[in-house]
Image (tube, grey):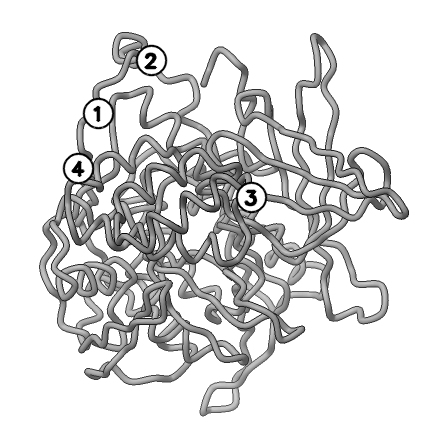
Amino acid sequence: MHFSIPETVQASEENGSKFWNFHIHVNGVFHCKLRYSQLDKFYEQLKNDFPGRIQSRLFPGKKLFSLSPDQLEERRDMLEKFIQHISQDPVIGVSDQFNDFFVKAQQAGLDIPSENVSLDVFLMNGNKVTLEISTTDQTDDVLEAAMTKIGLQEKFYYYFALFFVRKEDNGGGIRIVRKLQDFESPYLSLKAVTKPHRIIIRKNYWSPSYDDDLLEDRIAMNLLYVQITDDLDRGWMLCSDEQKKRMKKLQNQGSRKDVLRLARDFKFYGFLHYSPCTSDYPDPDSSALIASGDRELNIRVSKENDTKVMEGRFKVQRIRSWRLTSLPGDDDASKEKLQFAFEYLFGKDELRWVTIESDQAIMMSMALQGIVDEILREKRGQGIRLPRKKEKKDPNDTSSSSISGQSSNSTTNRSFLIRSSSQDKKSKRSDKNKGIGVNEDFAAGNIGDDDL
């Protein structure tokens, strides 16, 4: 996830005293506004609950007097780095403390009361599931409610996830905007967007090997089937004319399991595709089509007046690091340009950066992080996580949130399905990559071929 604080806004108390709100954006979208005092209480809570995981130098100290413009900018910058650091911490970033704090901050920022509401969640074929939830229910709560209503077995819940989609600006198909996270309320996030969005269910893994787990369960297989047929309709998979005929025959016969098995032979099966963008590969300002999939980032470039398509297949195992950069827009200073860049091992001792400019750069970074996380889990013999038992909270109870100045001693424990792997013995050694995603400059540290 990409947290940023692009602006600070001055506000006033009822008694006339002034203070600064720091506007926190997640993946380029406004999430909440927080005062320094609220973040300071949150920092103290995290220090108590997670001793040794946060260095004191990361959080800006208190000031006795009003801040000068330079001091305010320094505080904004340090708070931004602090939030980025804790969001990437493998323990803090998935904790109840982190998630509860930012959900309650989201609710306070939108000024929406805690109450029961209806929420529609859609499948990729347009069918919808209507849920009765609380406005403050987090993403995991909503996903589990949807899966329960669908009738899916619990062990398969997190093979799927909730995503935001919206129609393309050019009136074409739908664009997958992002995956919803557990530190937000899907209902509140839906209320916060300016353009109409939908919440959909899509698979939450990259390796096709996980498909085998779903094929023997009718409901799980059907969820996978509606996504794969939607991907086929979009043209996201490439196949020969003979494969296309065979696929049509199987669909007419209603042989869903055989359809899924055949589709796995198609190029780009299970890949996520992005809108056309610009890349400096193979040449500066190349018009490119990007797709993320099973351990691969794919870049296709077609040059003007040339019918041939140049394809670059970048294996995740050879990506050493990657980063996100925000640049001022050319015409409108208020609009940012986003760049996603990765450092790739093209050959022995030949590391080069490839830079992509896209308004979906954050999603590309998150997809790459998801692929890396999946590879590392498999090295440890872990599969996809299981639902964890947690007490249903009173939506009006703020006792676990540092927004109210209280502290919580709850911690997060996650269970995973055990997966057999030829890497089981290797996974017992110490994991050199446990710091992935924590580096302040890159979404991943130095990942070598021997690490994946």
- What kind of element bears circle 1? loop
User: Which label's residue is closer to the chain start, 1 or 2?
Assistant: 1
Asked if marks 1 and 3 touch (Cβ < 8 Å), the reply is no
Q: Position of residue 293 (x, y in %)?
A: 49, 38
Q: Is residue 274 left or right of residue 200?
A: right
Q: Is residue 136 left or right of residue 241?
A: left
User: Which label's residue is closer to the chain start, 3 or 2?
Assistant: 3
- Badge 1 density bin: few <14, some 14–19, many ≥20, Cα 10 Å: some
Asked if marks 3 and 4 touch (Cβ < 8 Å), the reply is no
- Badge 4 density bin: few <14, some 14–19, many ≥20, Cα 10 Å: few
Q: Position of residue 50 (x, y in %)?
A: 29, 40
Residue at which label 3 appears: 365
Marks 3/2: CA–CA distance: 26 Å
Q: Position of residue 115 (x, y in %)?
A: 21, 84
The kind of residue tagged 1 is Arg
- What kind of element bears circle 3? helix
At 61% across and 55% down in the image, what residue appears? 360
At 32% across and 65% down in the image, what residue appears? 123
User: Which label's residue is closer to the chain start, 1 or 3?
Assistant: 3
Asked if marks 1 and 4 touch (Cβ < 8 Å), the reply is no
Residue at which label 1 appears: 419
- What kind of element bears circle 2? loop
Marks 4/2: CA–CA distance: 20 Å
Marks 3, 2: nearer the viewer: 3
Marks 1, 4: nearer the viewer: 1
The kind of residue tagged 4 is Ser
Q: Decide: is 346 above or below 309.
A: above
Marks 1/4: CA–CA distance: 12 Å
Q: Decide: is 288 above or below 335.
A: above
Q: Position of residue 60 (x, y in %)?
A: 53, 51
Foreground of the two, 412 or 117? 117
Marks 1, 2: nearer the viewer: 1
